[in-house]
Amino acid sequence: MSTEHPPLAEFLADHWPVHDPHGHINGTVPGSIAVYDCICGDVYNATLADCLQHQADAWREACTIRTAEQVLNLPVGVVLHSNNDGAIELFSDGHGHWYLPGRRDAIPFRRVLDNLPALLIWHPDWSQS
Ligand SMILES: [Zn+2]
């Protein structure tokens, strides 16, 4: 299992709102207001809504592919959302062959790089969870 792109359920185990009954915001009495921390430690004394927004933002960041090195390390079967081409799937390793699903025209590797960042929308490891 790749640790770089864990399945959502595994990812969320590291970004989960934890209610802090003794927490407080801006000097209010501890326990008098619903206060949450993210289990990752990056968010604390926050509202539940803010914790959930952090969770969504962290997932989106984890799925954002920004560099050529990241693209080269993706396995066959990955699907990215590319700004220019929409959903594209990797059919062979390395500099290989990206296609629009259902189409036979390859998308040049250079074009994939020119349209970064892209969003990872499917990873083969995710089917194992
Ligand atoms: Zn977190």
Image: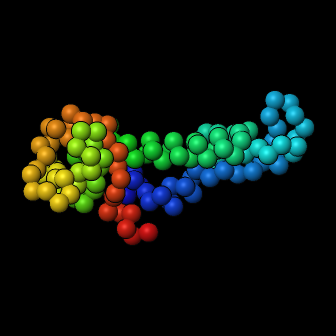
Q: Is residue 90 left or right of residue 10?
A: left
Q: Is residue 66 left or right of residue 113?
A: right
Residue 114 appears at what percent x and percent y? 21, 33
Q: Is residue 55 left or right of residue 78?
A: right
Residue at (77, 44) in percent of width and height: 35
Q: How is the image coloured?
A: rainbow
Residue at (69, 46) in percent of width and height: 48
120 lies above or below 129? above
- Whether residue 67 is visible: no
Residue 42 appears at what percent x and percent y? 61, 39
Q: Residue furthest right?
A: 29
Total marks placed: 0
- Residue nearest the viewer, comparing 113 with 99: 99
Residue at (71, 41) in percent of width and height: 47
Of the 4 image quadrants, the one containing the N terminus is bottom left
Residue 56 appears at what percent x and percent y? 53, 46
4 lies above or below 1? above
Q: Residue furthest bottom?
A: 128
Of the 4 image quadrants, the one containing the C terminus is bottom left
Q: Is residue 58 left or right of residue 39?
A: left
- Residue nearest the viewer, comparing 27 with 80: 80
Residue at (30, 47) in percent of width and height: 81
- The quarter holding residue 60 reads top left
- The quarter holding residue 25 reads top right
- Whether residue 49 is visible: yes
Residue 73 appears at what percent x and percent y? 26, 49
